[in-house]
Amino acid sequence: MDDLHKKFLEALNLAAAQKPAEAEKAFTAIFDSDPQGDLADDALCNIGILALAQNAIAQAESIFDRLIRDYPQATIAEYPGCSEHGRTAAKALLGLVNCALARGNATQAKEHAARLREYEDSWVDVGSQKKRYGQLASELLAAWETANKEYQEQMK
């Protein structure tokens, strides 16, 4: 494993340890060191995920849009313990679904989710089951709609 891959795993560990500022700095350094390399799309996607987790929705949307535009065929980095497989753009589209729902825009979220039909080759291992990103988006939308309906009923 080369130094850049080691740095990528270290950045993932920082994110998992709830150190978003340090993780973002590490992912940014990876991206900046080789914006056309095999980890550039993964670093960029993780920067978007960190922005989303910090409720920086506009920043996350911009990053996910850029990833889809600039790295449409890039694949998710495989490493020991990795549960995600396929194209990074699918992961970014799921991020856009999350962003749209964070804004309360279910229509836009459904549009992003529909685009995931193009990514049947991309999935996440969840337990002993493979879940395609489109399925994850559908589950997310259903949960959001249920929660939104319950909220609306409580407000009556």
Image (cartoon, grey):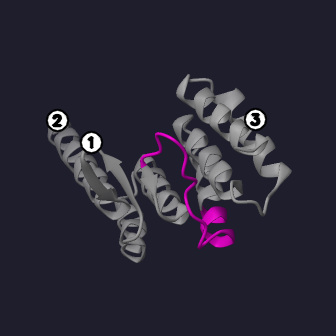
Residue under the image location 28 percent in, 48 percent down: 144
Calculate the distance from the C-alpha at mark 2 to the C-alpha at mark 1. 35 Å
Q: Kindly identify which residue carries mark 3.
A: 25
Residue 59 in the image: state x and y as whole percent.
65, 49
Calculate the distance from the C-alpha at mark 3 to the C-alpha at mark 2. 42 Å
Mark 3: amino acid: Lys
Q: Kindly identify which residue carries mark 2.
A: 154
Which of the two discs, 2 and 1, labels the residue nearer the N terminus? 1
Mark 1: amino acid: Gly
Mark 2: amino acid: Gln
Q: Is residue 133 above or below residue 51?
A: below
Residue 90 shown left or right of residue 139 in the figure = right
Magenta-colored span: 65-83
Circle 2 — which element? helix
Calculate the distance from the C-alpha at mark 3 to the C-alpha at mark 1. 31 Å
Crowding at dot 2, Cα within 10 Å, few <14 / some 14-19 / many 20+, comes out as few
Instruction: Using the image as rendered, state which of residue 25 and residue 10 is in the foreground.
Output: 10
Front: mark 2 or 1: 1
Please state, as top left, top right, bottom left or bottom right, where the N terminus lies in the image: top right
Residue under the image location 51 percent in, 41 percent down: 80
Residue 98 in the image: state x and y as whole percent.
43, 51
The residue positioned farthest toward the right in the image shown: 33
Do labels 3 and 2 touch, CB within 8 Å? no
Q: Kindly identify which residue carries mark 1.
A: 127
Q: What is the quadrant of residue 51 in the picture?
A: top right
Front: mark 3 or 2: 3
Residue 6 shown left or right of residue 100 in the figure = right
Residue 29 in the image: state x and y as whole percent.
80, 42
Residue 66 colored magenta? Answer: yes
Residue 129 colored magenta? Answer: no
